[in-house]
Image (cartoon, rainbow, N blue to C red):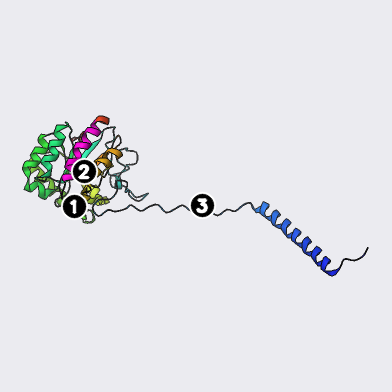
Amino acid sequence: MRAASPPRALWIVALVTAGLLGSAYAIGYSLMGHQSTPDIAAPSDSPHQFANQPPATSAAPEGSPSPAGPTADNADQDGPFGTQMTTGTGQVTLTFDDGPDPNYTPQALAALRAYRVTATFCLVGENVQAHPDLVRAIVADGHTLCNHTWNHDVTLGSQSYESIRADLLRTNEAIRAAVPDARIAYYRQPGGAWTYPVVSVSRDLGMVPLHWTVDPADWETPGAASIAGMVNASTVPGSVVLLHDAGGDRQGTVDALYHILPNLTSRFQVAALPPDL
């Protein structure tokens, strides 16, 4: 047999070498298995902090201890730092922060009265002291009271236990100066800026720390249509709706009530949170 020419011999050697390398790769691949790039979980969105309010879904860091024991098993205590953010039932509740205000609180009360709905009012101590008659009007209409600090101090939770306690007691005393023996069953931290100390103090004083489920951002004064649209679209059984009857121009909130109340009362039982726990 005639020997192959050098170019052809080189081609044959290259072909055989490539085949051997390919076989070795295939054998090694099958022995090692397919090693895909590991799944990398996208980082979770950090709780977005608005200028005045955080979203309802802000939560304490996973694994953080609760100052008052476990809360995960309680359906209504699933907010930041173990706060309550639902009614715990199919009932819906409206909450009003920052009052009382001589202009907007009477209008809010009139709207609630027109639809025979009670709500929860989170009161600021300075406003209570200035308008005790409005606190009496709130109680006379059957609404539930909630402590909202003396002067809407968003940073209160970062202060000492003693300072927090003094602020909350001062606010409760002002409320009870207007309405002796008033039941103040709830506490809401301004801005939703919850911390373990402020939750602990409120509970030690017999108040449930109350967050919210639905925030239409009425404090940004987006107008009645926007406020009503957000509340009506977002409310589900158990929702705690955040609204404001003071702290700025709240006419949009008051006007929105005449669209919110007929909508919600046609779909849910709407009432204040229970004043006696």
Mark yes or no: residue 121 visible.
Answer: no
Q: Residues within 10 Å of mark 1 (few under 14, many from 20)?
A: many
Asked whether the residues under the numbered discs 2 and 3 touch, taking CB atoms below 8 Å apart as contact, a structural biologist would say no
Spot occupied by residue 92 in the image (x, y as percentages of width and height): 25, 35
Q: Residues within 10 Å of mark 2 (few under 14, many from 20)?
A: many
Q: Does dot 2 land on a helix, a strand or a loop?
A: helix
Which stretch appears magenta?
A: 245-265
Which labelled disc corresponds to residue 39?
3
Residue drawn at 77 percent across, 61 percent down: 15
Check if residue 123 falls in the magenta segment: no
Residue nearest the observer in this picture, 245 or 139? 245
Q: Which numbered disc flags the more N-terminal residue, 3 or 1?
A: 3
Q: Does dot 3 land on a helix, a strand or a loop?
A: loop
Q: Marks 1 and 2, Cα distance to the nearest angstrom?
A: 35 Å
Which SS type dominates the magenta stretch? helix
Residue 170's place in the image compared with 21, above or below, is above
Which labelled disc corresponds to residue 164?
1
Q: Quadrant of residue 4?
A: bottom right
Which labelled disc corresponds to residue 224?
2
